[in-house]
Image: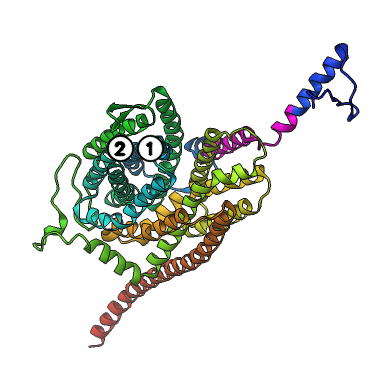
């Protein structure tokens, strides 16, 4: 409009084709330019405003869940609880050692994630070849990871965390080769490492709590801290990887076969982080197993528990077989696994589809602020994990899980139906807050439902339907609206299944309480009749 000489009078809302003259014309022209800039910038969602609002909410919720609130403000059920200083000190030492290892492991994973596709594309591979590599990674996690977890239960979880570090480091090294077969090997190794990351760490933590005789609420705190720290690590890893990838140019060092620099820098940093992770695990963690045997201290070597009875180590598939039998025989284990797989599958679909969804709704010609959007998602996750720490003092974990599934399903429905990028983005952050709550809730639920001797194996068994969902989303050509409608329905079904699981768990808890009361009453009746029996015996003696 400015180039055509049309003057827009902002005060009157009228337009004319008069030629601009003098100071008045230049003022009108400036107002016209400002009006046009405001018009076109208003088409993009206020991502910065939403980020700041989300950050403010996170600060408030985190403060409310912290020890500072309990110390200076008081209130809540937590104040009435009797705290054992010895338990608090034991838990602090445990969670410090756990987070040192776990967060270095997740740091290595977050460093690689944003640049896997970019690296394959820079090597010149087609869209089809890249899709094949991604499918191979998830397929590897589904096939090999399903029995690796069982091997960790009897072979030692600390030992398999060191194996995780070595396997993932080898996967990072393969990224330097512009060879499809070597890159495929790297994806297979990465799939196995991912299965270990999402099963063995959690199994070790639950057993460590059990060995130290810590209360159930400490386990929920540990998972909440891990989820909160993971979100912070994700933001830092994104900034670090972006800086490293842009610091140098990716160039061949041996013909056109081996490359260094550019998109490979984040993988090199991840390799160093994995070495540190393996060292921390070997030096700070004790060994524990999926049975009732004693744990082995940090830096000590343990024997395979499976071979202590003289039968030798079990076969490589026995862990998966036993896990499958246990899941089929226990409805609680089966329901927990279905709910876990469905929610995490919905989460992966969300990761694949949020970018095209926001792009389709945006009417701006500029690029979306992907870094700001990702940071907002992570802040929402942090808020969710802190919110769990507050609500778990008032509600059962099973009931909280029902709530987050219902809210998550509603958020996905909003994303699927929304025609506004602002509403869509707010709904996405609501779902991310549910993700932040999900990890500590599900971790606590699994800790009470899944048997210790098959824990890592069952956790990897849960990942088989999850990987089916991921492969389905990769191999089908669903639009963002169709994908989010699918996740809405999946989460609605998961909500119904979780209600069934919650009802069963609460009924079992009530029956257990009634049984304990009955046993106490029975013991009390026996104790109360003993004096009567003694008096009767004395009366009989006198009568004789």
Residue 63, relative to residue 15: is it above or below? below
The local crowd at label 1, few if under 14, some if 14 to 19, many if 20 or more residues have their Cα within 10 Å, is many
Give the left or right position of residue 21, taking residue 195 as reference. right
Please give the range of residues in magenta: 37-65
- Spatial CA distance of label 2 from label 1 is 8 Å
Q: Is residue 76 visible?
A: no
Disc number at residue 112? 1
Magenta residue check for 51 = yes
Give the left or right position of residue 171, taking residue 503 as reference. left
Picture quarter with the C terminus? bottom left
Q: Nearer the viewer, residue 513 or 60?
A: 60
Give the left or right position of residue 217, taking residue 358 as reference. left
Dominant SS of magenta comes to helix
Circles 2 and 1, Cβ within 8 Å, touching? The answer is yes
Report which quarter residue 35 is drawn in: top right
The disc, 2 or 1, on the residue closer to the chain's N-terminal end is 1
Q: Position of residue 316 (x, y in %)?
A: 20, 59
Helix, strand or loop under label 1: helix
Magenta residue check for 182 = no
The residue positioned 39% from the left and 73% from the top of the image is 518
Q: Residue furthest bottom?
A: 544
**Would you name the residue on which mark 2 appears?**
172
């Amino acid at each position: 409009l400015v180039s055509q000489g049309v003057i827009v009078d902002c005060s009157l809302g009228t337009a004319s084709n008069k030629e601009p003259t003098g100071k008045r014309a230049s003022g009108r022209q400036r107002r016209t330019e400002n009006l046009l800039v405001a018009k076109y910038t208003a088409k993009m969602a206020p991502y910065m405003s939403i980020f700041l609002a989300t950050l403010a909410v996170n600060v408030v919720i985190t403060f409310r869940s912290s020890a500072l609130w309990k110390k200076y403000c008081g209130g809540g059920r937590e104040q009435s609880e009797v705290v054992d200083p010895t338990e608090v000190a034991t838990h602090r030492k445990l969670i410090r050692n756990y987070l040192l290892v776990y967060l270095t492991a997740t740091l290595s994973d977050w460093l690689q994630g944003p640049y896997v596709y970019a690296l394959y594309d820079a090597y010149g591979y087609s869209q089809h070849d890249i899709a094949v590599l991604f499918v191979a990674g998830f397929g590897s996690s589904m096939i090999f990871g399903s029995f690796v977890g069982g091997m960790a239960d009897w072979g030692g979880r600390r030992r398999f965390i060191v194996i995780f570090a070595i396997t993932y480091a080898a996967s990072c090294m393969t990224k330097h080769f512009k060879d499809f077969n070597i890159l495929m090997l790297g994806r297979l190794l990465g799939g196995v490492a991912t299965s270990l990351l999402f099963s063995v760490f959690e199994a070790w933590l639950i057993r460590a709590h059990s060995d130290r005789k810590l209360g159930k609420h400490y386990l929920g705190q540990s998972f909440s801290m891990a989820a909160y720290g993971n979100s912070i690590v994700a933001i830092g890893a994104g900034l670090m990887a972006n800086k490293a990838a842009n610091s140098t140019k990716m160039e061949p060092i041996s013909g056109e076969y081996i490359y260094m620099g550019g998109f490979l820098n984040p993988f090199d940093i991840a390799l160093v982080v994995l070495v540190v992770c393996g060292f921390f695990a070997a030096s700070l963690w004790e060994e524990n197993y999926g049975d009732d045997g004693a744990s082995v201290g940090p830096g000590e070597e343990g024997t395979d528990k499976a071979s202590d009875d003289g039968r030798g180590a079990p076969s490589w598939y026995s862990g998966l077989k036993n896990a499958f039998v246990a899941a089929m025989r226990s409805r609680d284990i089966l329901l927990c696994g279905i709910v876990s797989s469905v929610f995490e599958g919905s989460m992966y679909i969300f990761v694949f589809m949020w970018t095209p969804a926001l792009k389709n709704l945006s009417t701006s010609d500029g690029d979306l602020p992907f870094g700001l959007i990702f940071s907002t998602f992570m802040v929402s996750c942090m808020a969710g994990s802190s919110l769990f720490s507050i609500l778990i003092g008032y509600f059962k974990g099973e009931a909280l899980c029902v709530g987050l599934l219902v809210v998550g399903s509603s958020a996905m429905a909003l994303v699927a139906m929304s025609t506004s990028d602002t509403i869509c983005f707010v709904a996405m952050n609501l779902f991310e807050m549910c993700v932040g709550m999900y990890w500590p809730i599900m971790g606590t639920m699994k800790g009470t439902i899944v048997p210790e001797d098959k824990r890592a194996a069952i956790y990897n068994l849960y990942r088989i339907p999850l990987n089916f969902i991921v492969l389905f989303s990769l191999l089908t050509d669903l639009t963002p609206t169709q994908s989010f409608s699918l996740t809405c329905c999946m989460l609605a079904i998961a909500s119904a299944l979780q209600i069934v699981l919650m009802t069963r768990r609460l009924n079992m808890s009530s029956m257990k309480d009634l049984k304990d009361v009955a046993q106490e009453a029975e013991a009390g009746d026996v104790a109360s009749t003993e004096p009567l029996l003694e008096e009767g015996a004395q009366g009989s003696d006198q009568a004789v």
